[in-house]
Amino acid sequence: GCPRLCRRLEGETARAVLANADTLLFDCDGVLWRGEAAVSGAAAALGKLAAAGKRLCYVTNNSGRTRAAYTEKLRRLGFPPAELRHIFSSAFCAARYLRQALPPGAAAYVLGSPALAAELEAVGIPHLGPGPAALPGPAPADWVQAPLDPAVRAVLVGFDEHFSYAKLCQALRYLLRGGPDCLLVGTNRDHRLPLEGGAGIPGTGCLVKAVETAAQREAFIVGKPNRFMFDCVAGEFRVDPARTIMVGDRLDTDILMGNDCGLTTLLTLTGVTTLDEARGHRDSGCPARHGLVPDYYVDSIADLLPALGE
Ligand code: PLP
Ligand code: CA
């Protein structure tokens, strides 16, 4: 297709692009809010989009919250009301993936949050693992004696603030016991979570890599840039990629997934990416970096307000 140009979305073009879309997929952190603070004007912009009859969906790699917690956060920050079916989080989509991939009754060993456990429960998958894990014995050689649950047929790795060497050992033992019959699934590969002021903490990708390294096999990744999350959206709603806009703040997750799925891609500069980085990919002439170039950018999604008749 045509080269993507990373042009500022404004004026007549903004009106035309929005008029052509019936669905918008929003990444959350860095686009709608940063931490607990809404991006200024974002709620008003989404209110206008909803009033104009657009379908708004939320596509987030964060496995640390349930869908219900997302609808509640959207409400609290003044965004238009969202139903559970509009929320596509990596925790929910991972549960959906395991539901379809595991035989009935099979359980998952989970490195993850209580929210990830709750999404598994919601689709009826027994699980063990969340929360702190005690060392199974005084010496590593004792650890291979700890009991294994015979029902476990998958290891699922999400954001786990209680990640530990003991859990890594247990995950490896399940993967070695099951061989290829034990699935290895990661919620996402984000390498870092941005905090205010440019600080960052290690992201879920670090934990997935640890398990992959131990097991010497590659995980199936649910989250962006994998197209599985978009397929979940398309399975729930009749979405036409040509009439869908993916809005995100990260090039290697949001924008890459949107481009791969044939969506119109819109980068916002309220999150982790600078305009120079996006232009660097565009101007590199490197085909391998072309998927990282968005069609358009805005400083903030609040900049869409004029095109929405404000
Ligand atoms: N993973 C975790 C654990 C997070 O806390 C966040 C952001 O808060 C993300 C991933 C990235 O989320 P998003 O895809 O909404 O930017
Ligand atoms: Ca983001």
Image: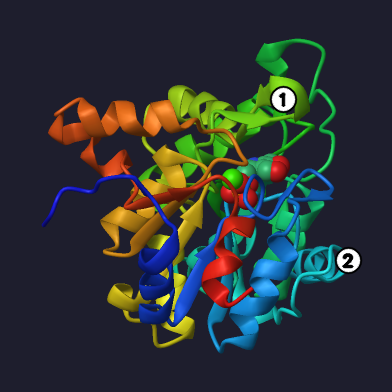
Lower position in the chain sequence, tag 1 or tag 2: 2
Q: Which residue is drawn at 48% across and 83% down?
A: 236
| Residue located 31% across and 42% down the image | 293
Crowding at dot 2, Cα within 10 Å, few <14 / some 14-19 / many 20+, comes out as few
**What secondary structure is marked by label 1?**
helix
Circle 1 sits on which residue?
166
Q: In this view, does 281 lie above or below 28?
A: above
Task: Name the residue located 50 percent from the left edge and 37 percent from the top edge.
Answer: 189
Q: Distance between the residues labelled 1 and 2?
A: 38 Å
Question: Residue 219 is drawn in which quadrant?
Answer: top left
Q: Residue 265 location in percent, x, y?
A: 38, 56
Please identify the residue farthest to the right as the structure is shown: 76
Residue 182, placed above or below residue 72: above
Q: In which quarter of the image is ligand 2?
A: top right
Give the labeled residue for mark 2. 76
Q: Where is residue 40 shown, x and y percent of the image?
A: 76, 52
- Depth order, front residue of 299/93: 299
Amino acid marked by disc 1: Ala
Q: What residue is drawn where x is 77% and y is 71%?
A: 71
Q: Where is residue 263 in the image (x, y as percent from the top left)?
A: 32, 65
Q: In this view, does 26 lie above or below 275?
A: below
Instruction: From the viewer's perspective, tell me whether residue 117 is left or right of residue 169.
Output: right
Judging depth in this view, the residue of 16 and 30 nearest the camera is: 16
- Disc 1 residue lies near ligand 1 with CB under 8 A: no
Quadrant of the frame with the C terminus: bottom right
Instruction: Name the disc covering residue 111, or none.
Output: none
